Image: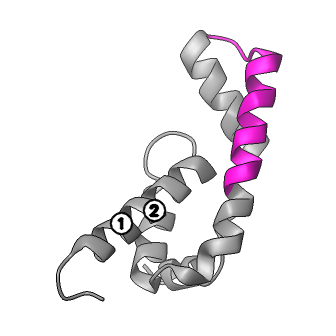
Amino acid sequence: MSALPSRAQSVPRIDIKATCNAVEAASSGLADPEAVAGCVRDETAAREQARRRWSRYPAASRRECAAEVRIGGAPSYVDLVTCLELAANALSSTPGTE
């Protein structure tokens, strides 16, 4: 559990190439170079989005999402950004949290 606070301080490091190769191999049985390249583009864009917005998210959301993306399967920046956005939307729509 002591690793979680450090994860919340900066965007987690994810090996994009390994993630994309694993995802493509799992879905099709082999890593299609074009699909992997598309995945790498999407993951790179999501990583940059996470870096730009990281400090805007509550620390609790950063910790929870950083831990969640590493549960089962390949970790993903796309999943990280999705988690953070869902958490932000949930907080903004909850009465009394503004």
User: Contact (CB < 8 A) between labels 1 and 2?
Assistant: yes
What residue appears at the point 46 percent right and 65 percent down from the top-left corner?
Answer: 84
Q: Quadrant of residue 37?
A: top right
Amino acid found under the numbered disc labelled 1: Asn
Residue 13 percent across, percent down from the top left? 70, 63
**What's the magenta region?**
29-46
Q: Nearer the viewer, residue 15 or 47?
A: 47
Judging by the rendered image, the residue that carries numbered circle 2 is 85
How packed is label 1: few (under 14 Cα within 10 Å), some, or many (20 or more)? few
Asked whether residue 32 is drawn in magenta, I would say yes
Horizontal relation, residue 40 to residue 92: left or right: right
Q: Is residue 54 left or right of residue 94?
A: right
Mark 1–mark 2 distance (CA, rounded to whole Å): 6 Å
Q: Secondary structure at mark 2?
A: helix
Q: Residue most toward the top?
A: 29
Q: Which residue type carries mark 2?
A: Glu
Q: Is residue 20 above or below residue 90?
A: above
